Amino acid sequence: MGHRTWGGRFEEGPDALAARFNASLAFDRALWREDLWQNRVHARMLHRVGLLTREELEAILQGLDRIEAEILSGTFPWREELEDVHMNLEARLTELVGPPGGKLHTARSRNDQVATDLRLYLRGALEELLSLLLGLRRVLVAEAEKHLDPPFVLPGYTHLQRAQPILLSHWFLAYYEMLSRDGGRLLDAKERLNESPLGAAALAGTGFPIDRHYTARELGFRAPMRNSLDAVASRDFALEVLSALNIGMLHLSRLAEELILYSTEEFGFVEVPDAFATGSSIMPQKKNPDILELIRAKSGRVLGALVGLSTVVKGLPLAYNKDLQEDKEPLLDALATYRDSLRLLTALLPGLRWRRERMWRAAEEGYALATELADYLAEKGLPFREAHHVVGRLVRRLVEEGRPLKDLTLEELQAHHPLFAEDALPLLRLETALGRRQSFGGTAPQAVRERLLEAKKEVGLA
């Protein structure tokens, strides 16, 4: 009974450990909704082409409805010896409706069945992720707007050394841009996977008079896949999704990493909400950004899923091989990891408490405005490379004396180069330096305000 799907060729059943090793029910049962949908559409198609009577079709559809009710109520009798979700549903259908249930698999193989289910599942999962991604992008836009007036200023970094001041709003919008591209990749993957393998059967198509265009249309696919070998053998659609998820998680990891750094005593720019932090079992004073650290760490988990499936696929001959059973566990795990990370950051970001005065002081320190003086000399006609050396020598002297850049007098500036005049002194103020970065995409308040207005429109907030 347990091997009724293929047992006719065999004199004995499989070894118990081999049977457990072979079974995929523990993870592919997640596809039960898609499998029921596919079964209904396949049954209707078989009736349309004359392979099922009206009575058989009605019996099958009623049986599938009964199965759905059982699964939703938690009373469905899942059986590991039936290997996978497909055979569990088919076996239960046959128990409920008799011989018509055994006809449902006509003109179909588990090879095209699972490929179809997985594409259907991914299509729905990507729609959910795109919705969650939109929610996080809206939060980034809202946070950028909230910290624009009055402006919160953040030291910008290169090589993790203070470089030039930027608006905190500009920082938020940088991650908005990254996540917008992530959404584009998910959309591209969703569009490319939206073809139907159903009807490719085991690998060569079928001699039954099926209508693949009908089943593709009823399942919401753009079209049936054009090559039966490709339909059952290819998992590039899963690799593309994993690649998009990997890049998306890398961006979330970078965001988490910066917040972890900024929340340390050494930086002191932001405090993580209590609801998304933990304490220490031994040190009462500790407040650890564990959720952010886990998001950072779980990017490796998603990368591992991509590498793992790539390794599975790289040496497979056509067409279907059991190796492809290894596509679902890493893929489902990566989807769940990215989904949860999006939800957590969407909830966490609005609760961050940014320390405006601490950030402002940090932006003023470290000679971050030195570039303004070099640009000033270049605007006065001095070649920029020479201007760079002039200001570099000036900064070296200040470092030796332990003095900040803003303490410079006009006389000291002119002692380093006669082109310095009174109008150079305002460049030593943050407001002036920020206001000068008006190039397209720059951090000047007006440039950020213009981009913010566009972003609000893009995510439906304006």
Image: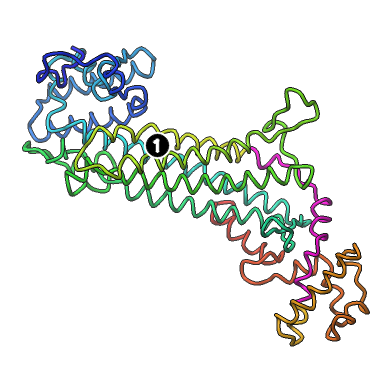
Tell me which secondary structure the magenta stretch mostly adopts. helix
Which of 141 and 65 lies nearest the eye of the viewer? 141
Residue located 81% across and 55% down the image: 362
Whether 380 is drawn above or below 327: the answer is: below
Residue 358: image x %, image y %? 82, 50
Region rendered in magenta: 348-374
Residue 240: image x %, image y %? 37, 48
Q: Is residue 163 left or right of residue 50?
A: right
The stretch drawn in magenta includes residue 353: yes
The stretch drawn in magenta includes residue 365: yes
Q: Quadrant of residue 265?
A: top right
Residue 292: image x %, image y %? 63, 38
Q: Is residue 82 left or right of residue 166?
A: left
Q: Is residue 55 left or right of residue 433?
A: left
Whether 213 is drawn above or below 113: the answer is: below
Q: Quadrant of residue 434?
A: bottom right
Which of 405 and 170 lies nearest the eye of the viewer? 405
Q: Name, please, the residue furthest toward the front.
A: 400
Which of 120 and 377 lies nearest the eye of the viewer? 377
- The type of residue carrying mark 1 is Leu
Q: Is residue 112 left or right of residue 376?
A: left
Screen quadrant of the N terminus = top left
Judging from the image, the colouring scheme is rainbow
Mark 1 Cα shell of 10 Å, populated few (<14), some (14-19), many (≥20): many
Q: Quadrant of residue 305?
A: top left
Residue located 64% across and 64% down the image: 450
Whether 150 is drawn above or below 225: the answer is: below
Screen quadrant of the C terminus = bottom right
Residue 270: image x %, image y %? 75, 44
Q: Which residue is mark 1?
A: 331
Where disc 1 sits, the SS reads helix
